[in-house]
Amino acid sequence: DIQMTQSPSSVSASVGDTVTITCRASQGISSWLAWYQQKPGKAPQVLIYAASSLQSGVPSRFSGSGSGTDFTLTISRLQPEDFATYYCQHASNSPPRTFGQGTKVDIK
Amino acid sequence: QLQLQESGPGLVKPSQTLSLTCAVFGGYVRSGDYSWSWIRQAPGKGLEWIGYIYQNGSTSYNPSLKIRATISADRSKNQFSLKMIPVTAADTAVYYCAREACGVWSGGLCYSYYFDVWGRGTLVTVSS
């Protein structure tokens, strides 16, 4: 199975900051990666699919990049509603689906 | 707009069967190029994919759970279900159902899926 490793596990930031989260796959997965945001007590919501495609309705301050084994989620101009936990997910057409362990973004 | 709603017992005894159902509203489990998944999250932990059922009825499971989990779909009721047996305290979690959509089409083949719609989740506690 392909393992997904996120870093950092947590990050403290202020409103207006730019935050970068990285995700590394244990083997190459082309651009088959998705990013999700989860707020406490809520289901995750997709932000990015296919590594860099923004899901409809998601603010443009969220962006994704990368291919192969190394991927990045960037949140520009951090807003109060962006404080949450973020997960990457191996999203190829070959199961099993695997998630990173999560990165918590909290207020500095 | 597609909506998913999980239902089932909130408390299950160890060694017994966990049974959950996901009702689908605003769409159909047996149409379109979609898979229908179960994902769980233990308290304070990350997300774990359990398995899916594809619109044609084929299934796939997390190897770590495969022998205990079964996912099925009922077209007449427009819902899909999860059964896990036997359960232990380690199966205590919030269980989510979710739809997988295709993110990248090429040459008539989908190369990448992602979870685009989620249910609210239901907490299942395994305890005697």
Image (cartoon, coloured by chain):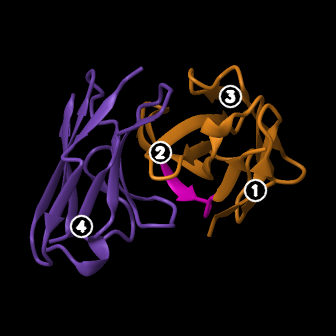
Chain colours: A purple, B orange
Query: In the rendered image, which residue does mark 4 sit on?
Result: A106
- Secondary structure under badge 4? strand
- Label 2 is found on which chain of the structure? B
Percent position of residue A75, x then y? 18, 63
Query: In the rendered image, which residue does mark 2 sit on?
Result: B47
10 Å neighbourhood of mark 1: few (<14), some, or many (≥20)? some
- Residue at x 50% of width, y 26% of height: A95
Q: Above or below — where is A32 with respect to B114? A: above
Q: Amino acid at mark 4?
A: Asp
User: Are the residues at dot 4 and dot 2 in contact (C-beta closer than 8 Å)?
Assistant: no
Q: Above or below — where is B64 with respect to A51? A: above
Report, in whole angstroms, how far the alpha carbon at label 3 lies from the one at label 2: 20 Å
Query: Quick one: B82 or B12, which is closer to the camera?
Result: B12
Q: Above or below — where is B69 with respect to A27? A: below
- Is disc 4 in the same subunit as disc 2? no
Percent position of residue A51, x then y? 27, 44
Report, in whole angstroms, how far the alpha carbon at label 1 lies from the one at label 4: 31 Å
